[in-house]
Each structure stands twice: as structure tokens, then as C-alpha cells.
Image (tube, rainbow, N blue to C red):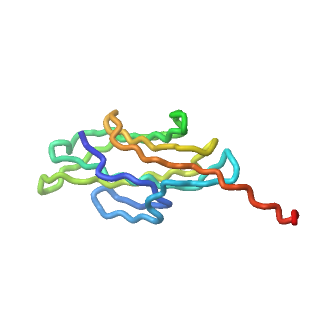
Amino acid sequence: MPDIDFAFLADAAQARPGEKFSVLGGGVSRLAARTFPFRHPHLALVIGLSVTAPETNREHEVRFVLLDPDGRELAGAGGVLRASPPPDARDSVLTFAVDLWNVGFDRAGDHSFRILVDGSERKRLPLLVERLPAEPDPAVN
């Protein structure tokens, strides 16, 4: 079964399977808001899927699920991909990025992204969502 070579959250990313990728603001592990619920405008989930030569030319399901602090699913998506065998029949890493627009969070706490390959959880990314203190009222002095 393919494995996750790497996975992380970023502010933005561009990736084409089998090629280099570009990341802006990689390593996101915390978000913060003053009020809840809130929507974060954009995150990118970057995944490097390690595929051995015998696992090429077969379909593999990749799915991610965003969980709230109680383990309830807030969002999720998935797809099926097929790795083409490289000309030298070596193992390879397929890198791809998933754009996540307007992700909603009902409350602060420890959230996480679960990444599943062929129905089995292969990676979990923690995401702490924090509450910022209220801004002081400039009229009060």
C-alpha cells in the first residue's frame, strides 16, 4: 500500500505529480481568531505519496478528513489516482496539493487532518485553533 512520505499545511502551494512543487508559508500548525465561528480563507494541504514500482498502474484512493476537537468531521474530500510507472521502474513520490477554501471552525481547540490511503489512516496533522483576546475598545480610556 502506498505510504505518506510527507504531508503538511501551507498558506498556498502549487504541485504537479512527479514534478517539483512550490509552497508559500509551509508548516501551518496554528490558526487564530477573535470570534467563533470563523472561516479561514485558504489553506493548502500538500501530500507526498510514496509509491513503489509494483504499486504503479493501479488505482489508489486518497482521502483527507478535518476533525474538530471532539473527533467530528468538519470537512473532507478524496479522489482516486493512478501512478504511472517511471521509465526506470523505480519507486517514486507523487506530490500533490489540495486547496481548501473558506474552511469553517466552530470553536477553538485541537483539530486535526487525517489522511487516508486505500481506506487506512497513514498520517495525522495537528492543527491548533486558538482564540485571540478581544481588541481593547479605543473609546474606553
Q: Residue 51 at x, y = what percent?
A: 23, 47
Q: Position of residue 93 (x, y in %)?
A: 26, 54
Q: In this picture, is 116 found above or below 83?
A: above
Q: Is residue 55 above or below residue 86?
A: above
Q: Residue at x 29, y 61 (%)?
A: 19
Q: Nearer the viewer, residue 128 or 97?
A: 128
Name the quadrant of the N terminus. Answer: top left
Q: Residue at the far left: name it.
A: 88
Residue 124: quadrant of the picture:
top left
* Point 50% across, 39% down: residue: 67
- Look at the image and tell me in which quarter the C terminus lies: bottom right
Q: Camera-side residue: 131 or 57?
A: 131
Q: Quadrant of residue 115?
A: top left
Across and down, in percent, residue 98 comes to: 44, 51
Residue 107 placement (x, y as % from top left):
63, 43
> Left or right: where does residue 2 sit relative to residue 109?
left
Residue name at image x 69 percent, y 53 percent: 34
Give whichever of 20, 70 is nearer the camera. 70
